[in-house]
Amino acid sequence: RLAASFKKQYPEVSFEIEIGDSHEITERVLGHDLILGFTGARPESEKIKAKEFLSDRLVLAASSEIVKKDRLSFKELLDLPFILREKGSGTRKTMEVFLGKKGIAIKDLNVVACLGSTDSIKEALKATLGVSIISKIAIEEELRQGVLREIKLKGLDIRRNFYIISLKKRTLPLIYKRFYEYVLSEAG
């Protein structure tokens, strides 16, 4: 959405958008392969400048065929087929920390799949493969259409931020700088 609205202001700009998990995007910025990146976890490298631009909530989601109830306990969660994001994903990292505080490790879940993107998780949820903890922003349309549903989990309140990242010592080319500033102003 942000790229499309920016392009309306700067029609001569073209985008190349590459998808990867937070770890991969951070490594590509560090390796000078990407000038700007967007991550769902704050990079740990001192060489990276990370600016928060969007807040999100992670929610438990599934199709109505998998979960009929509106609320579940953590004990009930352990019995459901669970779909995970891959290691390196900001969503997974945030979820692991939260579940760890509840005394639940990944090995305690009934993991049926580990997938490499939010879109693949959404498709697996729609195909009734299982349940997952996923970005609410990512499934807004599916929730609105009733294709997926949010299941309340007592005590589940996982909030996280998205970051726009670049190298601290790199001067952004003008159009990148304008896009960076545009993202911060539009999201804020």
Image (cartoon, helix red, strand yellow):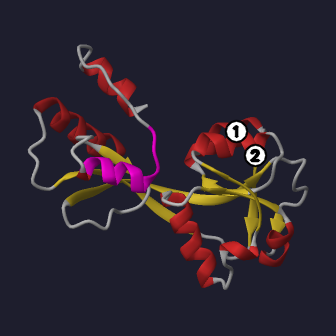
Q: Is residue 25 magenta?
A: yes
Distance of label 1 from label 2 (alpha carbons): 10 Å
Is 52 within the magenta? no
Callout 2, which amino acid?
Leu
**Spot occupied by residue 30 in the image (x, y as percentages of width and height):** 24, 53
Crowd band around label 2 with a 10 angstrom C-alpha radius: few (<14), some (14–19), many (20+): many
In the displayed structure image, the side of residue 34 where residue 69 appears, left or right: right
Q: Which label sits in the foreground, 1 or 2?
A: 2
Q: Is residue 153 above or below residue 137?
A: below
Label 2 sits on residue = 125
Q: Are marks 1 and 2 in contact (CB under 8 Å)?
A: yes
Q: Position of residue 161 (x, y in %)?
A: 42, 59
Q: How many marks?
A: 2
Q: Secondary structure at mark 1?
A: helix
The residue lying toward the viewer, choosing from 123 and 8, is: 123
Q: Residue at x 51, y 66 (%)?
A: 93
Residue at the disc numbered 1: 142
Q: Quadrant of the N terminus?
A: top left
Residue sitting at 80 percent across and 72 percent down?
A: 78
On the image, the x and y values in percent for residue 145 come to 74, 35
